[in-house]
Amino acid sequence: MRNVLATVAGIIAMGTLVAAQGAKVDAGKATFTAQKCTTCHKVGGVGGKLASELDGVGSKLSEAEIRKWLTSPLELEAKLKTKPKMPMSGYLKTHKLTEADIDALTAYMLSLKK
Ligand code: HEC
């Protein structure tokens, strides 16, 4: 009986975790639009052409790399072969992201897998 209860509790905990992650992805999607990341990036064919399309970015970059793009874009831009015309670092200076925005955006980016 104890095992059954433990299993049930485990399943409930897992379900809650999946739901929490889903909520974060949704929040990230809303933040992506609210912060106008679409000015430069396309997702699902919607958005600007100034930077790369982000469909599939969740398969390309790790969580740490995505987070870094949102917290220190200048450092990563310095490593690009061609300098962007519209750098993300300049944009993020005037569009401050909160810790919660960064968490949600990272979860959303990671969900964009190809
Ligand atoms: C002013 C234009 C601009 C805006 C606005 C912008 N970015 Fe970027 N972003 C860039 C450029 C330029 C790069 C680096 C070159 C590239 O990937 O095209 C980049 C790179 C990235 C990358 C790495 C992509 C890869 O494939 O390596 C991610 C992730 C990203 N941006 C997310 C975001 C998010 C989330 C927002 C909204 C908070 C945002 N960007 C807003 C211009 C922008």
Image: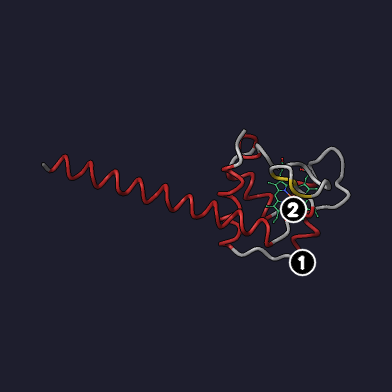
* Residue 88 percent location from the top left of the image: 78, 54
Task: Name the outermost residue toward the top.
Answer: 114
Residue 35 at what x, y percent from top left? 70, 61
Q: Quadrant of residue 99?
A: bottom right
Mark 1 vs mark 2, CA separation in Å: 16 Å
Answer above or below: position of 42 versus 95: above
Mark 2 nearby-residue class (10 Å; few <14, some 14–19, many ≥20): some
Query: Which of the two residues, 93 or 53, is positioned nearer the viewer here?
Result: 53
**Label 1 Cα neighbours within 10 Å, binned few <14 / some 14-19 / many ≥20:** few
Q: Nearer the viewer, residue 46 or 114?
A: 46
In the picture, the quarter occupied by the C terminus is top right
- Disc count in the image? 2
- The amino acid sitting under disc 2 is Thr
Circle 1 residue: 94
| Quarter where residue 32 is shown | bottom right
User: Residue lying farthest left?
Assistant: 1
Q: Secondary structure at mark 1?
A: helix
Q: Residue at x 69, y 66 (%)?
A: 96
Which mark, residue 6?
A: none
The residue pinned by badge 2 equals 38
State the residue lying farthest toward the front.
Answer: 45
- Whole-percent x, y for residue 21 in the image: 47, 50
Say whether mark 2 is within 8 Å of ligand 1: yes
Residue depicted at x 65% and y 35%: 60
Q: For this view, does 78 lie left or right of residue 108?
A: right
Q: Is residue 66 above or below residue 93?
A: above
Q: Which residue is painted at 75% across and 48% down in the image?
A: 41
Colour approach in the figure: secondary structure
Mark sitting earlier along the chain (1/2):
2
